[in-house]
Image (cartoon, rainbow, N blue to C red):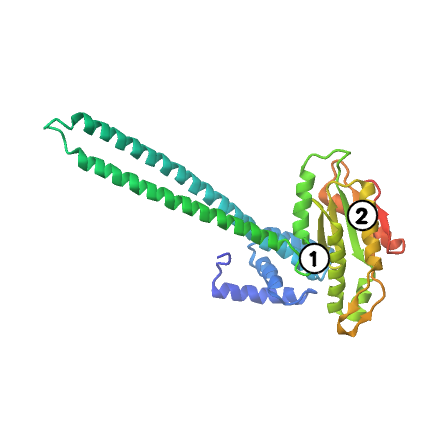
Amino acid sequence: MKYQHTREESAEYLRLALPLMSSQNAAFHPVSYAVWYEYVAGMNNALKLAADSLLSQRAPLGEDDIATLFERYVADVDDKLMSKFITGFQQAMSDISESTAATAQEAHTFDGLLQTFATEYSRAPQSLDLHALRAGAAVMQTSMRALQIQLDQSQSEIQNLRLEVARARDASRLDGLTGLTNRIGFEHKLEACLSGEQTAANSPCLLMCDIDHFKQINDTYGHLFGDKVIRAVAGIIKENVKGRDTAARFGGEEFIILLPDTSLQGAHALAEQIRRAIERGRIKRGNQNETIARVTVSIGVARHQPGESPSGFIDRADQALYAAKQGGRNRVSLAAAA
């Protein structure tokens, strides 16, 4: 179990965590409590440093901030530990399996030697009772064979468990509202993409998208309808993302798309395609059959430059998005060179 605190200790951490939860713009849910529990318990130094950094930049923290802290420093820590445990345990099982196979082979060889010895001396009246020895060797070989089967089955179970952990990890990197990759999952994808060899011919591109006037939509029609708008925009983005491309909900009404194999010209064309598709769409309000004014998005496009960090890459795409917003919204803007 991750939390080994006594009843008295956990009660004290609860007392310390509640004021921190109350001072943020996030609901009182288990995710928020887990973040602030580990924060006040002093059991997660990386989380504390990240939370303190966020609090120094802006306070109170919102739902997206809390979700990011949880995914990156609470949930993902367990994931890494579990993956490490499963990998190590599978290796140990593999080693035992190999040792057992070798022992079984030795028993088989020993049995053959005994049979040869018995044949050569079967006619000698002074010969030993090799039948008993041979029977014992057979029992040994049978036992080792059974052990080998059992270990093989155990190794298969460990492999299945590892696959389940991988599936759980993948599920934890999906956004619950849209089904797109979530922020932590996207950051893993981006890091993996940029860790490969980059050339001027195959540098990846980013699209940073934001729904225009989303706060006004929420204020006018309510948060449930706002969620419907987010899902609709995510659906259009998903329809236009193919192959190795990754679309993610980056936070709130903001989306990000990684294009590993697309030129800047192609990325710009895709951004315009997505923008026009969203502009043409209309969303109705539940059973009222009321169609609201069009929903639009602004999009920033950036191409990765040699030596650029993942955060720098995202920042340039975000700056291009900001330029599109400042330019009147419902448009695509290309990022300047770093």
Q: Give residue 98's position: percent from left, percent from top.
A: 40, 37
Q: Give residue 332's position: percent from left, percent from top.
A: 85, 50
User: How many C-alpha atoms fall within 10 Å of the one at disc 2: few (<14), some, or many (≥20)?
Assistant: some
User: How many C-alpha atoms fall within 10 Å of the one at disc 1: few (<14), some, or many (≥20)?
Assistant: some
- Select label 1 or label 2 by which is in front: 2
Q: Is residue 107 left or right of residue 59?
A: left
Q: Outermost residue toward the left?
A: 125
Q: How many marks?
A: 2
Position of residue 306 relative to residue 248, above or below, is above
Q: Is residue 30 left or right of residue 154?
A: right
The tag on residue 309 is none
Q: Which residue is mark 1?
A: 55
Residue in the image at 79% along x and 40% along y: 263
Q: CA distance from mark 1 to mark 2?
A: 37 Å
Q: Give residue 140's position: percent from left, percent from top.
A: 27, 39
Image quadrant for the C terminus? top right
Position of residue 163 relative to residue 130, above or below, is below
Q: Quadrant of residue 309?
A: top right
Check whether the beta carbons of the residues at disc 1 and disc 2 lie within 8 A of each other. Answer: no
Residue in the image at 66% along x and 55% along y: 68
The tag on residue 270 is 2
Q: Nearer the viewer, residue 49 or 173?
A: 173
Q: Nearer the viewer, residue 247 or 62?
A: 247
Q: Is residue 21 left or right of residue 218?
A: left
Res. 240 visible in picture: yes
Q: Outermost residue toward the right?
A: 327
Q: At label 2, which amino acid type do we have?
A: Leu
Q: At label 1, which amino acid type do we have?
A: Leu
Find numbered disc 2 in the image and state the secondary structure of the residue it sits on.
Answer: helix
Residue in the image at 74% along x and 57% along y: 235
Q: Give residue 25's position: percent from left, percent from top.
A: 70, 65
